[in-house]
Image (cartoon, rainbow, N blue to C red):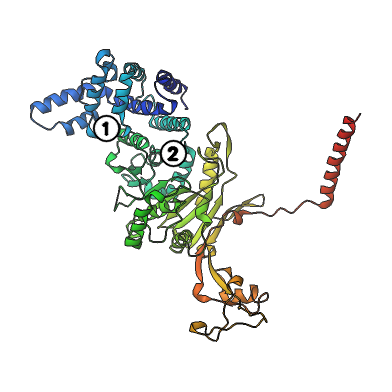
């Protein structure tokens, strides 16, 4: 946690819980209490005005809610005369008073605490004799945005979730994305729209289908305001984890966002924002997670709705649902005639190449490339995420490509752009510096072929260069005497029967004629071969690493021999010393 005071405070609360709670359960108490105190601090200055306004409006027989929202200066309010500090004045009735205080929040806030299942924890703390002590701890710390900024608070929540997930052996990093990676992605989706985004009064929408605690939405909002203080970004999202969902809603509430735009549930099986389309989108879906639990719903949508639904291009294997999120985001793009969309999504390596021609993965790649939707794919360094050290890739996808990008795909190898962290966080050992982010952003913006010290960094390809035909090469079946066996009936009547044991496939680049390739590559080695054209399929793959491979010639043999001789001589000397 960046703030040492906050960090020590949080763990002083954990000390109180030790014994009555398992370490893995600390988050069930600390996270909702942190949110409660944050909201309590935000409303503190307008508390008296809200209570006075309520009395006036109720006396006049009016619904006080819209007036109270105006007086609070927020999208929420609390009508209780109590606050967390006043709760300390009645130790014997702390539980009843705390429940009453929470019940006096406006409905949007009450729903947040229901997502935390906070009432259960209040009961449990009460029975353990800890409720007053824990409430007193939180009442004593100031979490007002003037003291702890929204950005700091977001980082605190993410750090808490990571810590508690580690203690309970959960996947610690699945709920959020490192902030510097988000900043890079935000730079990339906004970079080509600078002129439009600096216009006075501009309004744009940003969506994250895997919102976590709202980190991507928050950084997106901060970035747009830094470009244009008069701009407004309406934020939308959906989140599956109840605690992350509650924190995201609380954060959006304090930022003045409409929290009805944040949905709970599984984005893939139950789209919480059906029919909505957005200007910008960001997502870091879980890497390599199977979708077996929701397979029935996904297949039903794919079969019944086809391209009118989200999964028309195809379905990936059940063991990895990454590409389902890619297709979900594509379905949420604002139509090009209405201004179009751009989004960034973090994926692992398998969506680039898994699955041969005709497979679900290949068909999805074929759809996005043939429809010219992918602007760039950026390879990030390993060890960038909290829960995995694998290679990851940011895809930038748009249905409003600028003219110089049309028909093309840019690949950027940013795997060498990193600095070592002072202290590792889970699997995260590397980070992007601000200079690295600027450098990658510039490479993307320039959209040119770039090499450094003879090593390619940025390359530009035609979309068709990633496509190929998979052809099936047949060889004739022969009898014991080596004579070709001819078919007796059907379409093979009088023609050579294929020998399935000799059957083979070849991948032919889309840029080359199949017959030309066949004559050059196959017939010289198998003059009796032919192509079964009925089995020909179109495939697409993006062999990212191959395009950045630089051949290093082996060292001279004499140099290797000399090195081996030196090692051998040292070993013999050591053995000689032992024998004395």
- In the depicted structure, whether residue 515 falls above or below residue 309: below
Q: Residue 15: name its quadrant.
A: top left
Circle 1 crowding by C-alpha within 10 Å: few under 14, some 14–19, many from 20: many
Q: Where is residue 412 in the image (x, y as percent from the top left)?
A: 55, 51
Residue farthest to the bottom, as pictured: 494
Q: Residue at x 32, y 16 (%)?
A: 132
Query: Mark on residue 577?
Result: none
Q: Residue 372: name its quadrant.
A: bottom left
Query: Mark on residue 109?
Result: 1
Nearer to the camera, 68 or 113: 113
The answer, for residue 400, to whether it is visible in the render is yes
Residue farthest to the right, as pictured: 580
Nearer to the camera, 521 or 575: 575
- In the depicted structure, whether residue 216 falls above or below residue 77: below
- In the depicted structure, whether residue 538 falls above or below residue 191: below
Nearer to the camera, 502 or 534: 502
- In the depicted structure, whether residue 281 falls above or below residue 33: below
Q: Distance between the residues labelled 1 and 2?
A: 22 Å
* Tags 1 and 2 touching, CB below 8 Å: no
Quick one: quadrant of the C terminus?
top right
* Residue identifier under label 2: 176
Q: Where is residue 454 in the image (x, y as percent from the top left)?
A: 67, 52
Q: Where is residue 507 in the image (x, y as percent from the top left)?
A: 57, 67
Q: Which residue is drawn at 33% across and 47% down?
A: 204
* Element type at mark 2: loop
Q: Position of residue 137 (x, y in %)?
A: 36, 18
């Amino acid at each position: 946690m960046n703030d040492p005071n906050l960090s020590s405070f949080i763990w002083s609360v954990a000390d109180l819980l030790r014994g009555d709670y398992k370490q893995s359960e600390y988050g069930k108490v600390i996270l909702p209490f942190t949110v409660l105190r944050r909201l309590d601090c935000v409303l503190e200055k307008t508390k008296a005005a809200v209570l006075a306004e309520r009395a006036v409006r109720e006396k006049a027989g009016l619904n006080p809610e819209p007036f109270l929202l105006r007086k609070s200066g927020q999208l929420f309010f609390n009508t209780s005369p109590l606050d967390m500090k006043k709760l300390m004045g009645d130790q014997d009735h702390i539980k009843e008073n705390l429940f009453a205080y929470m019940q006096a929040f406006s409905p949007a806030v009450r729903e947040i605490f229901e997502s935390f299942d906070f009432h259960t924890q209040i009961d449990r703390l009460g029975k353990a004799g800890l409720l007053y002590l824990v409430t007193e701890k939180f009442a004593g710390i100031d979490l007002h945005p003037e003291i702890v900024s929204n950005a700091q608070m977001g980082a605190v929540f993410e750090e808490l979730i990571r810590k508690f997930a580690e203690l309970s052996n959960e996947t610690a990093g699945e709920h959020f994305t490192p902030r510097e990676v988000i900043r890079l992605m935000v730079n990339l989706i906004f970079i080509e729209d600078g002129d439009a985004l600096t216009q006075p009064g501009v309004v744009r929408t940003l969506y994250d289908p895997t919102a976590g605690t709202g980190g991507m939405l928050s950084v997106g909002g901060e970035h747009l305001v830094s470009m244009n203080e008069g701009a407004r970004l309406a934020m939308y999202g959906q989140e599956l984890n109840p605690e992350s969902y509650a924190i995201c809603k609380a954060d959006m509430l304090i930022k003045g966002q409409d929290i009805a735009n944040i949905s709970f549930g599984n984005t893939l099986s139950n789209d919480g924002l059906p029919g909505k389309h957005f200007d910008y989108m960001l997502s870091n879906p879980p890497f390599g997670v199977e979708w077996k639990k929701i397979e029935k719903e996904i297949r039903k949508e794919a079969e019944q709705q086809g391209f009118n639904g989200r999964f028309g291009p195809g379905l990936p294997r059940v063991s990895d649902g990454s590409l389902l999120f890619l297709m979900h985001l594509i379905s949420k793009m604002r139509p090009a005639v209405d201004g179009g969309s751009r989004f960034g999504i973090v994926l692992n390596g398998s969506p680039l190449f898994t699955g041969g021609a005709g497979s679900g993965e290949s068909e999805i790649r074929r759809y996005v490339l043939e429809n010219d939707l992918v602007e760039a794919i950026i390879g990030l360094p390993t060890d960038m995420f909290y829960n995995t050290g694998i290679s990851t890739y940011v895809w930038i996808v748009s249905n409003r490509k600028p003219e110089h990008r049309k028909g093309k795909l840019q690949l950027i190898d940013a795997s060498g752009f990193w600095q070592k962290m002072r202290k590792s966080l889970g699997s995260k050992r590397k980070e992007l510096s601000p200079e690295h982010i600027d450098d990658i952003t510039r490479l993307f913006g320039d959209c040119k072929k770039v090499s450094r010290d003879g090593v390619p960094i940025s390359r530009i390809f035609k979309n068709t260069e990633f496509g190929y035909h998979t052809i099936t090469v047949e060889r004739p079946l022969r009898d014991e005497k080596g004579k070709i066996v001819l078919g007796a009936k059907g379409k093979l009547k009088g023609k050579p029967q294929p020998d399935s044991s000799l059957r083979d496939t070849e991948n032919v680049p889309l840029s080359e004629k199949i017959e030309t390739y066949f004559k050059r590559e196959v017939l010289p080695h198998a003059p009796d071969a032919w192509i079964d054209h009925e089995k020909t399929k179109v495939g697409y793959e993006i062999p990212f690493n191959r395009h950045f491979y630089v051949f290093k010639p082996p060292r001279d043999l004499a140099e290797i021999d000399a090195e081996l001789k030196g090692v051998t001589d040292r070993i013999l000397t050591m053995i000689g010393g032992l024998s004395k």
